[in-house]
Image (cartoon, helix red, strand yellow):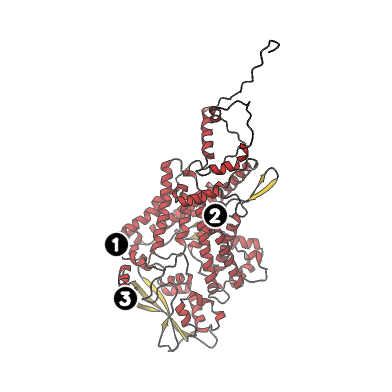
């Protein structure tokens, strides 16, 4: 200015005009980064150092317009692969609920194995399992081939010359209970879930030579547990501050939970659909009573282990029971397709939610009506994959999301894109695997090959994708095998089991989700012809009779834990004779009648029964220890 020249004007700030598409993209990015209520304090605490930076007073003040038109840079971290752009697409609470319930069902299964397997399959049990695994060891010299055909942890931890002992089975069950307890308490780990799947499969493999684990929910638990592995965070390595490694997913992630894989949620929905459609089709193609709508006239009376609530359902008006059959088909064949609806808008999202609630609610109804072990609890789990976070109570959302708020992404973390690529690759491989393994399952459901639909079947040794179904036919009458013992051949005392009907005055029990396996197995003998079921499927009954007549030492009687406490006391003295008779049982009255009798001081009579036929005539043991018919 002193030289008469004007000062140069400051350089104009160049602002790039952005298109309407970039404005829309920026809007969704801001929505994805929008912090839930209560997160502002956490954000300020993380960025408190920014307030300490002195402002440049000479710098031009930024306008609101500049902030609103800021262009998103690819290097900025938004969130994980599941952006959770809206409440209808958030499944954090769903992931939390599924893993907790899977851990709970695992715990019940392993607890039952710990309590019952010594008596069922131990060295002094009814059908020892070590001989079956010894045959497998001799058949497969290569443990890898043996594992792929009959999965078990014993292929790798036992020497080739060693046999499975009782303490090995106890160790598997105890380890399963411990690990599943950690899952219930909140430990989300692919490693823990993998070990639980392997330990459960070990027990199922040991029981292959028996009928004690030949139930559809054994495969269903294995498939559900396998999918749960991939619902957890995967073992990936990230780098922080440029040089510090951080391993995520080995055990619980120190930074809190991350959103679940949407691909895995879709596979859970596919599992839910297969369970429901398989059960519906097997009824439609099974007994004529489903078409005539009369199956529920006697289903609640003839189910394996009725509960006191079964005495309400059985005596409902027949018109209600006929409508209940319609409800069954509506749930399992018609409304099940709602679980496949994508949440592209509010209407589709609400319909998918309704599909999940229908499936879960139907299972709760069955849980109330009888004792079906952990089958219905397990079936609720895949239905939860249809429910987003807005379907859960507020306290649960607050609890889970508080943990999620602690999971903040470090802007210096430079491997986010590689992690997402790895997660996407794993999801793609898993989705392709399940799709290929579903081909024979779909063929079975549609009877493409011309064969009759198989119920509760697996088409490969690892049981990753299975077909399911239940109660394709329903017996119209209930027959019970009653075991009696005697010391003189004239006075007989009946043996009671924990929950199966026996004494007509004993109250039915509530035992679900616990599974009394011997009570369930003996129920199959009630199907006619009784002798055929005894010889083909439940021949363990002969072994039980022999042990009742011969075992005297307490250490050789682990099977006593399978009986009711009153019978354990009775058998402290070894009897001389045993017989098995078949009785026809009928419910004596509704639960309201039983309650009225109880309030009046009368002993309720729950069942009416009449003698049907002998199943095993009185037997004793000969000098060589073998069973022989008694001459009385």
For the point 60% across and 64% down, the residue is: 152
Q: Is residue 488 left or right of residue 190?
A: left
**Residue corresponding to mark 1:** 318
- Of mark 1 and mark 3, the one earlier in the sequence is 1
For the point 53% across and 36% down, the residue is: 30
Residue 269 appears in the picture as rendered: no
- Observer-side mark, 3 or 2, equals 3
Q: Is residue 197 above or below residue 240?
A: below
Q: Nearer the viewer, residue 510 or 37?
A: 37
For the point 70% across and 12% down, the residue is: 2
Secondary structure beneath dot 2 equals helix
Picture coordinates of residue 207, whole percent (x, y): 55, 68
Q: Which mark is residue 601?
A: 3
Q: Nearer the viewer, residue 5 or 221?
A: 5
The Cα atoms of the two marked residues, 1 and 3, are separated by 31 Å
Q: Which quadrant holds residue 615? A: bottom left
- Of mark 2 and mark 1, the one earlier in the sequence is 2
The quadrant of the rendering that contains the C terminus is bottom left
Q: Residues within 10 Å of mark 1 (few under 14, many from 20)?
A: some
The Cα atoms of the two marked residues, 2 and 1, are separated by 41 Å
The quadrant of the rendering that contains the N terminus is top right
Q: Which quadrant holds residue 556? A: bottom right
Picture coordinates of residue 579, whole percent (x, y): 43, 82
Q: Is residue 38 above or below residue 180?
A: above
The Cα atoms of the two marked residues, 3 and 2, are separated by 51 Å
Picture coordinates of residue 53, whole percent (x, y): 64, 35
Picture coordinates of residue 412, whole percent (x, y): 65, 41
- Observer-side mark, 2 or 1, equals 2
Q: Residues within 10 Å of mark 2 (few under 14, many from 20)?
A: many
Q: Which mark is residue 228?
A: 2
């Amino acid at each position: 200015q002193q030289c008469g020249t004007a000062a140069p004007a400051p350089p104009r700030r160049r602002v790039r005009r952005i298109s309407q598409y970039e404005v829309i993209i920026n809007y969704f990015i801001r929505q994805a980064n929008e912090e839930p209520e209560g997160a502002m304090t956490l954000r300020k605490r993380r960025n408190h150092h920014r307030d300490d930076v002195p402002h440049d007073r000479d710098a031009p003040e930024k306008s609101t317009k500049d902030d609103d038109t800021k262009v998103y840079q690819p290097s900025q971290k938004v969130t994980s692969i599941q952006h959770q752009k809206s409440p209808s697409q958030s499944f954090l609470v769903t992931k939390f609920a599924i893993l907790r319930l899977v851990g709970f069902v695992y715990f019940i299964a392993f607890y039952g194995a710990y309590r019952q397997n010594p008596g069922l399959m131990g060295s002094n049990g009814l059908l020892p399992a070590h001989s079956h695994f010894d045959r497998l060891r001799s058949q497969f010299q290569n443990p890898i081939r043996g594992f792929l055909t009959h999965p078990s942890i014993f292929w790798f931890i036992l020497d080739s010359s060693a046999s499975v002992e009782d303490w090995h089975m106890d160790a598997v069950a105890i380890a399963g209970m411990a690990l599943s307890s950690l899952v219930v308490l909140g430990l989300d780990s692919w490693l823990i879930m993998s070990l639980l799947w392997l330990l459960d499969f070990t027990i199922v493999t040991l029981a292959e030579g028996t009928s004690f684990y030949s139930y559809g929910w054994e495969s269903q638990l294995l498939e559900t547990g396998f999918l749960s592995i991939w619902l957890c965070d995967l073992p990936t390595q990230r780098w922080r501050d440029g040089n510090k490694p951080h391993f995520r997913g080995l055990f619980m992630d120190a930074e809190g939970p991350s959103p679940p894989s949407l691909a895995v949620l879709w596979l859970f929905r596919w599992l839910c659909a297969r369970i429901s459609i398989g059960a519906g089709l097997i009824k439609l193609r099974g007994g004529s009573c489903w078409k005539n709508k009369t199956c529920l006239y006697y289903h609640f009376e003839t189910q394996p282990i009725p509960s006191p609530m079964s005495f309400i359902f059985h005596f409902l008006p027949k018109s209600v029971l006929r409508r209940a059959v319609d409800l069954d088909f509506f749930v399992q064949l018609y409304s099940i397709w709602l679980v496949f609806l994508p949440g592209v808008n509010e209407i589709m999202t609400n319909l998918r939610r309704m599909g999940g609630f229908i499936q879960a609610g139907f299972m709760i109804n069955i849980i109330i009506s009888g004792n079906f072990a952990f089958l219905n609890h397990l079936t609720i789990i895949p239905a939860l994959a249809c429910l987003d976070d807005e379907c859960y109570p507020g306290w649960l959302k607050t609890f889970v999301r508080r943990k999620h708020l602690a999971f903040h992404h470090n802007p210096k973390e430079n491997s986010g894109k590689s992690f997402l690529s790895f997660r996407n690759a794993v999801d793609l491989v898993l989705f392709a695997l399940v799709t290929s393994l579903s081909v024979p399952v779909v063929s079975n459901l549609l009877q493409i090959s011309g064969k009759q639909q198989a119920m509760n079947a697996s088409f490969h040794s690892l049981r990753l994708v299975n077909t399911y179904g239940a109660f394709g036919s329903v017996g119209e009458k209930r027959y019970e095998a009653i075991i009696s013992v005697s010391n003189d051949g004239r006075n007989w005392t009946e043996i009671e089991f924990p929950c199966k009907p026996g004494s007509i005055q004993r109250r039915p029990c509530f035992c679900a989700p616990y599974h009394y396996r011997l009570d369930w197995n003996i129920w199959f003998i009630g199907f006619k012809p009784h002798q055929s079921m005894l010889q083909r499927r439940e021949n363990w009954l002969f072994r039980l009779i022999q042990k009742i007549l011969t075992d005297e030492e307490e250490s050789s009687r682990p099977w006593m834990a399978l009986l009711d406490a009153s019978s354990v006391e009775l058998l402290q003295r070894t009897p001389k004779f045993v017989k098995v008779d078949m009785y026809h049982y009928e419910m004596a009255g509704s639960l309201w009648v039983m309650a009225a009798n109880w309030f009046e001081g009368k002993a309720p009579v729950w069942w009416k029964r009449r003698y049907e036929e002998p199943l095993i005539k009185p037997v004793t043991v000969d000098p060589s220890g073998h069973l022989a018919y008694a001459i009385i």
